[in-house]
Amino acid sequence: MFSFKPDRSQYPAPGPDGKLEVDLETGKYLKLWHGPNHPGITGNMSVELTVCGDEVVEGKTHVGYLHRGFEKLMERRTFIQVFPIVCRVCVPEPDFNEYCYAAAVEELAGIEVPEMASWIRTLILEMGRFNSYMMAMGGISGALGLGVVGQWMTYVRDIMLDRFEELTGARIYHMFILPGGVRAHLPEGFEARMEEVLQTAERYLADAENLMFKSSVFKTRTQGVGVIDPALFERFGVTGPNARAGGVAKDVRKDSPYLVYDQLEFTVHTEEASDIYARTLVRYKDLLETIQLIRQILRKMPKEGEVMTNLPNVLHWKIPRGETYIKGESSRGEYGYYLVTDGTGYPRRVNVRGPSYTHAMALLEHLIPGTNISDVAALMVSLHTYPPEIER
Amino acid sequence: MREILYRLKDRYHLGTPTFQRTDLCFVTVRRDEIRAILTELRDMEGFTHLTFLTAVDWIEEQLFQLTYMVNNREANLSLGLRVLLDREDATGDTIHDLWPTAATYQRELREMFGIKFPGSPRVDEEFILEGWTDLPPYRRDFDTLAYSQQTYNDRPGRVTHDPKTHMQKTLYPSYPKGAK
Amino acid sequence: MSLRDVLSPFTAWKHVIDDPVTIKDPFNRPGADRYRGFHQNDMDKCIGCGSCEEICQNAAIDMVPVEGQHAGPGDSGLRPMIDYGRCCWCALCVDVCMTGSLTMSNEYTWVDSDPDAFRFVPGADGKSWDLDVKGYQREDVRRLTGTTRAPMGEMPAEERIGNFCEIVDGFTPEQAVIEADRCVECGLCVATCPAHMDIPDYIAKVRDGDFEGGLRLLYETNPFSQACGRICTHKCETTCAAMHEGDTIAIRWLKRAITDSVPRERYFDLIRKPDVPETGQKIAIIGAGPAGLTTAYDLARAGHKVVVFEALDKPGGMMRYGIPEYRLPYDVLDHEISVIEAMGVEIRCNMRVGKEISIDQLKTAYDAVVLSIGLHQGRSTRVPGSEKAEAAIDLLRRITAGEEVPVPEQVAVIGGGNVAMDIARSMARLQKIIYGTVGVTVTALEELDRFLADREEIEEAQEEGCVIYPARGPQEITVAGDTVTGLRTWKVKAIFDEEGRFAPKYDETDEMIHPAGMVVEAIGQMSDISLLGADLTEQLEWNRGRIMIDSEGQTSEPWLWAAGDVTSGPDVIHAVADGHRVARSVGKMLAAKREKLQ
């Protein structure tokens, strides 16, 4: 079987500032831009690779391809006006931004949210997780040439977007979780249509399992590849499935329950191998768990009740000086908003803590040296990163 | 949370803590003690997870606030440590040796706020911006609206009317408004 | 690596005969029922308040005039034009819409090669989706701006009926801030206010807790802000954007909150006479009511010498002698007038023009004369026995002046306006004090919902025990010897004829006798113009019994202006507006005169 055991001793060691000095003139090394337009890249990001033969000597993450300075834009907007732009920080799972921002504003402004709204928020977050995992499953398969899984997952994600559309009024940027609650109740017959989607998803996932976790190709390309030493987890701020694949049951939903998670039953799945295979498997299991959670939420949620509370006049809404940090467990790990207010009608500072910030920068750059070029895409995708969280 | 702060209080200068929630507290510390406090929190108190590091610009007070958010997962506690830096020639102490991932945060703060972190790896490399020569853009004195107005053109032909003024013009143009 | 792992990927082949899942005709796929697509705007419902523009974080909305929509009461005539190059479909505009006129259709597939086609006025520029029922609309009530008025303390009926103490507590500063928060600052009310006060601006000052700044703003447009904060007819509140889905903003009480929150002595620091040179020109004003004193205030601040001649022994006009104390305490009025006097206005009381001094003397001694004598004579129904009736306005004056008035156990009032309520409630108080019970009957031609009196006046009168009989026309005041015994009324079938002229029709079979020891007529007032003298009356031009004036209040005589109830009416705020108008007109004439002299 294929094995790849690079000998690092032949390359120069990185300097004290972390920089690797290689002499491109020798012809021994080659610079390779992996992205931003590359099927193995999640979103608009690139990795500048220095390779020697087919071995990667160094990788540097480059972001900034979609930087719009969201955090700065928020400082120019009133508290309600921030609400439509937060979701844009993350395309595949925008709802986390809406929830974290709304919860932060509610905490600092002292606003109580109706219980019904908390249930609907939880539902939406799980639906978002479902979609995000679908993208991750499709992404990792795509990165390894299993395009058909990607197509299946895209289809399943699409019919979940239909549910988003009927619930929130939009497919991608839902703009549904306002400070104070959510915009509307579930539409009539929503539960039945959601059940159809979930059953379709389960069918496709069973098929995908055959192509992934039971496939010799997939196993060969992922088992033992891209291993993250669990000892690195804390040093590199690793959270979410990336940590759970290494045996650390980190999950904000359990560790620090928010919304109605303390009323829901679910398992935090872990693996031990901490390789690409384990990370994908953790996501797969968590995805199945999410499907159960959506069912559970729809079953347990109250049937009636207000979804929105009265806000002070948002056209001149001022929030006293204060700061807070709201976090939740997104599909990629700990997601959070740090909100600082100064007594005016505008946020003083909004800082988005996305898991990709550490995963795709410091961690990826640490993992890349010594891998084979052909594994870089799978490694990256297995970290499940969304570049907008890095550059916000 | 309070016990931890009591233990720290003996040896370090802590400001008045803000207990935001039962699981979240903010406290101001001195710059020359931040590394020691973080090390102690990480190694002795179980705050092993650096959640984020960011800055807030209090331009009116000529200060930058660095916020180090650390988390103890077992105890479900988060502690936000504030360090106030003079806004002129602001310099922080690198903690990349405590958490390698901090290097990324410090690189961003260097670029977006202009806060220096001597000794942090690749801290002067461009992070998000390319060829930026203006003020560090996340500083409060960088005016994004003015920048975009200089850089881009507004779509021509747009004009709006204030309801009050419009009604005054159409309904009571001759009334002595504000007669003294 | 097992054989199973090699074979299992081939299971994917089972899908080879599946139908494609692609949507074959994406252009005809309808959006979800609450999809946020292109906007719809109900042109008739929209009031052009601009809240949508205000909340839009993309600056995608412009308020523009559109064909067929005109500015009018409570409608700016503007409508939102949306630039879809900027719109992000967040629907905050729909959520904040004050009337619910703005909604969204579920249409999202429209394409056009002209980018400018994507900037239009929904509802005015017809689109295929204008009548679509589906699409996003607010599921709930309006949550983004308050819909409920802040609470305010008020004396309960049983406590207030035995005295003339002020009924309404007014907002505390804290309550005022809460109420002020609800205002969306559209400014539609400014057009409705006769004096065009800067309502959103002073409400903003309340919100910021800057009551002194608010007071300065008030006095820029209204030197009777304290009185208006209590007894204004507050027509502004009938055009408030908030009324469409919730309580209208308590504009009047917010004004009062400002005036109450500033200590009285501070007024004299905040409202200072501008530093202008004395012109040496003199103006005589006849009548120290709101119109006359506003004119005086403006002219004195412009550097002129102003003397106000008042026939009664205290200034204030109807605000003092018409409006009962429980609505406008006298000390408030005294303070209000002292601020005006601080501008250098001289008020000479007990100077009845035509008696103590003649109008000709004024014409000779002053550069201009302003007639603001109000309406101090009650009109009569002229039904049999009406010579025995009391005039409401006369009774009110006597009560204020502290004169003894007869208080029978039963009183019948004819009229449905504010004056009728004022006298009914005043008499009720006197009855309560003397007899411990209230016996007041109010009859009026109109149905209750068409009464001219303010709604709260009617409600409060009823709470205090006054019995109201709407749609009853007076036929006779019954008399036994010299004493009044009651009022005989018929049911009103119609008040106006087909051409809209006043010609009441009665149902004679439906007769009622309201026993009463006193009948009060409160069906309107007129001016006592005897002071003009025969010559001047002859010279002046008249219009249906009223002195004719031009748009700036000048009569046909170049030295004489008229302001207030005597020409227009019907309330303090109109009088104030008149005063400003006349003051400017007088000022222009005086300036021209000065120029000529130089």
Image: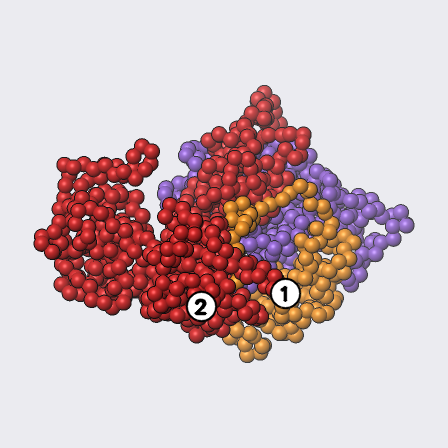
Chain colours: A purple, B orange, C red
Residue A344 in picture, x, y percent from top left: 54, 61
Could one spot residue A384 in this view of the protein?
Answer: no
Q: Is disc 1 surrounded by few (<14), some (14 to 19) or many (20+) residues within 10 Å?
A: few
Which of C463/C495 is in front?
Answer: C495
Q: Which residue is mark 1?
A: C598
Of C159 and A73, nearer the camera is: C159
Q: Amino acid at mark 1?
A: Gln
Q: Identify the residue at image location x=70%, y=65%.
A: B115
Distance (Cα) linking label 2 and label 1: 25 Å
How many numbered marks are there?
Answer: 2
Residue at 55% across / 47% down in the picture? B169
Q: Which label belongs to residue C307?
A: 2
User: Mark 2 or mark 1, which has the lower sequence index?
Assistant: 2
Residue under the image location 59 percent in, 68 percent down: B82
Which of the 4 quarters of the picture holds residue C340? bottom left
Query: Where C289 falls versus C275 (above or below)?
Result: above
Amino acid type, label 2 = Val
Residue C137 spot, x, y in % from top left: 47, 39
Residue A97 in percent (x, y) is at: 56, 49
Residue A139 visible: yes
